[in-house]
């Protein structure tokens, strides 16, 4: 998705480093697990924006761990907790996934969320200009990402001290923490407030939130890039309608089932191919334009990561739709039913 | 590797279609296996150049198989029998791999080699001009690829009828058939003859053979593109020396362990990281420039597919060496020991 492909532009990744952030890699916890399990093989997985840090983390761990331990860095692309390197996980005694909170707790995985040390409050103070005064409308939702979860309660208190009624939710099973959003899931923003304050790096998450909740104003307080803005979603529906229209005459449909552990929607994929004899089930982990170019289809339905469909759709040689948009394209649902495709299960 | 990336240029893939080739997909054998095993999920994997045929093959199978069978096309890149979609294999009742002979026999896989119907003898007749007359030097090796294995005995007879002493071998465990070559293994050409006749499509295989056996003349009789030529290997050593020289000052080495079932050389990879504290083990399936760019290394050693190193090396941002070249670069072996990296095990 665009997070991986917009090389050099880290503003969309939540990983932009305008501030000199330091991460807590929780090395002690990892070394403890290595010793407890007498591990000899340890796998380390970092998301794209932090892969460069991997070798240094491995150095620090080598120094602290017994000599007979082999450390392996996952070279697979990684964009979320949905995206575990299960090959490496199954072949190592200890497997550490950095940069995300658990999508589902598991004894086989040590999650190190990498909490940011950036102070969120100066930029939150700036962001208040974009919210109504509390005496005008006190209701505000508050959401953030894994990197800032450690300050979430403090943020809530800070807003309450300033007179706001702060609405937060844990969301559904896919979300581990109160107030947490993912690129594909904004259930934590299903709260009774017309505005939501997003505190975190980049626009990837808040733009998703604005697409899912076009009726809400999403204010971005970005402490990493030190910027306040409003999440835009104007182009979203226009682009989606355009893709649906292009796909409408399709004679052959490629239905993508993503094999990444947290990105598979098997029943949706199978239902489509069972009910459409012109649909073909295609399985893959990374969904890329190159890979789909090999298939002679008129349109694709992506049951995997919705952000590949909505954000990267135009990079594919044929229109790519979400499962809901597919139903509109084949006339099973009205066109105006189209909405942002969210992902709610784990695995 | 270049087979996948030189889009539109099929001459390197062995899949160029100057002749109207028809393939025998052995549908009856597949349907029989489906019925025997009461399969409800069937996986189909095609190599890159044949992925477009997948939907039609799926259509034909749907028509012949019971109604409750779901067919899945693998969307993973595939470049050889080393490159099975093990995810799909493990999750389907019948898994069919098209376009390659078995690298290792397995009950879990139906291999459909897709023998070509192209007549090899007219171009073999043309190729005789490039071989010495039999009374001058009768010894000639004969090799081919999976697509033409079905005519291999006929080809041998044809050459013998013309006065040649034809030398053929099965090669080692990685090669299933007499006279067969792979992009990474030319053990079938270890025969007492100064010239080897390669009959098959494209230059990918014969150029590898020429790199492995620079002392032999490799004559290409390509019945697909209807062309005769001599396989070139002049640039090979020059390029390899250049890469080794560039890598010589490296402070940080990335050691790639490829997780594809037939491309893993675990012991080699582990030995390197055990003996070099500046080496980091990186695991991945597809070895691509994008994926390695995320790692801040000065040079890479690729223990996976040797053809990615030799053919695609220049596309990577840092020098990439074979395990043997790495030894030369760190001074453990003389520079003139460098040779083509071949692959001999299965899994």
Image: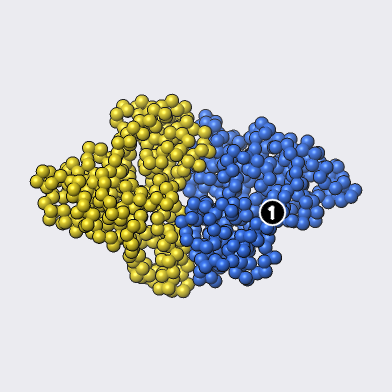
Chain colours: A yellow, B blue
- In the rendered structure, the answer to whether residue B227 lies left or right of residue A308 reads right
Q: Position of residue B272 (x, y in %)?
A: 55, 67
Q: Position of residue A176 (x, y in %)?
A: 28, 53
User: For numbered disc 1, what is the local secondary structure?
Assistant: helix
Which image quadrant is residue A37 in? bottom left
Answer yes or no: is residue B88 visible. Answer: yes
Q: Position of residue A322 (x, y in %)?
A: 37, 36
Answer yes or no: is residue B187 visible. Answer: no
Q: Position of residue A216 (x, y in %)?
A: 22, 40
Which chain letter goes with mark 1?
B
- In the rendered structure, the answer to whether residue A312 lies left or right of residue B324 reads left
Q: Write the residue at 22% across / 48% down.
A: A197
Q: Name the residue beneath numbered marker 1.
A: B235
Residue in the foreground of this view, choosing between B206 and A92: B206
Q: Write the residue at 50% across / 42% down.
A: A291
Q: In which quadrant will I find the N terminus of chain A?
A: top left
Q: Write the residue at 63% across / 71% down.
A: B332
Q: Write the residue at 46% across / 34% down.
A: A318
Which image quadrant is residue A177 in? bottom left
């Amino acid at each position: 998705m665009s997070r991986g492909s917009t090389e050099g532009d880290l503003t969309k990744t939540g990983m932009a480093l305008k501030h000199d952030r330091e991460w807590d890699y929780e090395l002690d916890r990892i070394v403890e697990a290595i010793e407890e399990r007498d591990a000899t093989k340890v796998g380390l997985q970092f998301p794209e924006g932090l892969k460069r840090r991997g070798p240094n983390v491995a150095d620090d761990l080598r120094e602290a761990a017994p000599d007979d331990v082999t450390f392996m860095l996952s070279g697979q692309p990684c964009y979320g907790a949905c995206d575990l390197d299960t090959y490496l996980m199954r072949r190592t005694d200890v497997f550490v996934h950095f940069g995300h909170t658990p999508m589902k707790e598991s004894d086989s995985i040590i999650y190190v969320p990498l909490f940011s040390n950036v102070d969120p409050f100066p930029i939150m103070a700036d962001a208040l200009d974009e919210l109504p005064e509390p005496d005008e409308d006190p209701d505000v939702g508050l959401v953030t990402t894994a990197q800032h979860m450690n300050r979430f309660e403090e943020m809530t208190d800070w807003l309450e001290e300033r007179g706001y009624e702060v609405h937060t939710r844990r969301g559904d099973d896919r979300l581990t923490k109160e107030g947490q959003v993912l690129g594909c899931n904004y259930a934590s923003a299903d709260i009774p407030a017309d505005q939501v304050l997003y505190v975190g790096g980049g626009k990837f998450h808040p733009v998703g939130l604005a697409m899912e909740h076009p009726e809400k104003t999403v204010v971005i307080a970005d402490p990493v890039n030190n910027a306040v803005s409003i999440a835009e979603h104007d182009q979203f529906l226009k682009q989606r309608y355009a893709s649906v229209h292009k796909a409408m005459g399709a004679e052959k449909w490629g239905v993508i089932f993503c094999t990444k552990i947290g990105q598979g929607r098997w029943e949706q994929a199978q239902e489509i191919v069972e009910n459409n004899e012109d649909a073909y089930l295609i399985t893959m982990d990374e969904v890329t334009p190159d890979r789909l170019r090999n298939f002679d289809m008129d349109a694709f339905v992506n049951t995997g990561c919705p952000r590949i469909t909505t954000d990267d759709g135009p990079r594919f040689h044929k229109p790519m739709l979400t499962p809901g948009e597919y139903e509109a394209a084949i006339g099973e649902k009205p066109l105006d039913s189209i909405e942002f495709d969210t992902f709610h299960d784990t695995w």
